[in-house]
Image: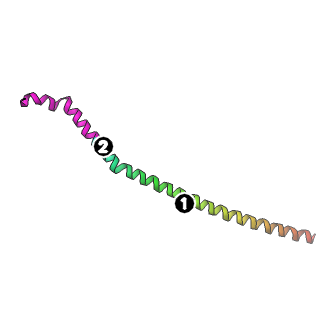
């Protein structure tokens, strides 16, 4: 095969397919090695923040319930005192 016989294959559809395959492989490698770890770490960080917020919310809820119970007991004591006065 001479160079002139091979030239149509190098410049025609075969080379276009080869270029597409190479570009596709490069894109896949870039996405797999760069973008997916970034997205994964971002999602993990976001889920950690949600877990922290949930824990804080639970602690705040428990403290609020405790304070409401203290307030209810004091109101009952005040009500008892008012009944004694009247």
Disc 1 and disc 2 in contact, CB within 8 angstroms: no
The image quadrant that residue 62 belongs to is bottom right
The answer to if 16 sits in the magenta stretch is yes
Between marks 1 and 2, how big is the CA–CA gap?
A: 36 Å
The relative height of residue 26 versus residue 13 in the rendered view (above or below) is: below
Q: Residue 29 in the image: x percent, y percent? A: 30, 46
Figure check: 61 above or below 39: below
* Residue in the picture at 39% in, 52% down: 38
Between residue 1 and residue 30, name the one nearer to us.
1
Type of colouring: rainbow
Q: Which residue is mark 1?
A: 52
- Which residue, as the protein is rendered here, is positioned at the far front? 1
Indicate the secondary structure of the residue bearing disc 2: helix
* Residue 25 placement (x, y as % from top left): 28, 41
The magenta stretch spans which residues? 1-24
List the residue tagged with mark 2.
Answer: 27
- The local secondary structure at tag 1 comes to helix
Main secondary structure along the magenta-highlighted residues = helix
Horizontal side of residue 84 vs 61, given as left or right: right
- Residue drawn at 25 percent across, 36 percent down: 20
Query: What is the quadrant of residue 75 in the picture?
Result: bottom right
Q: Give the position of the C terminus as an image quadrant.
A: bottom right
């Amino acid at each position: 095969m001479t160079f002139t016989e091979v030239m149509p294959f190098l410049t025609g559809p075969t080379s276009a397919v080869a270029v597409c395959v190479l570009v596709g492989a490069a894109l896949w490698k870039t996405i797999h090695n760069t973008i997916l770890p970034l997205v994964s770490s971002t999602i993990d960080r976001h889920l950690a923040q949600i877990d922290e917020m949930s824990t804080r919310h639970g602690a705040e809820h428990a403290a609020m319930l405790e304070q409401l119970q203290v307030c209810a007991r004091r109101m009952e004591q005040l009500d008892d005192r008012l009944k004694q006065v009247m």
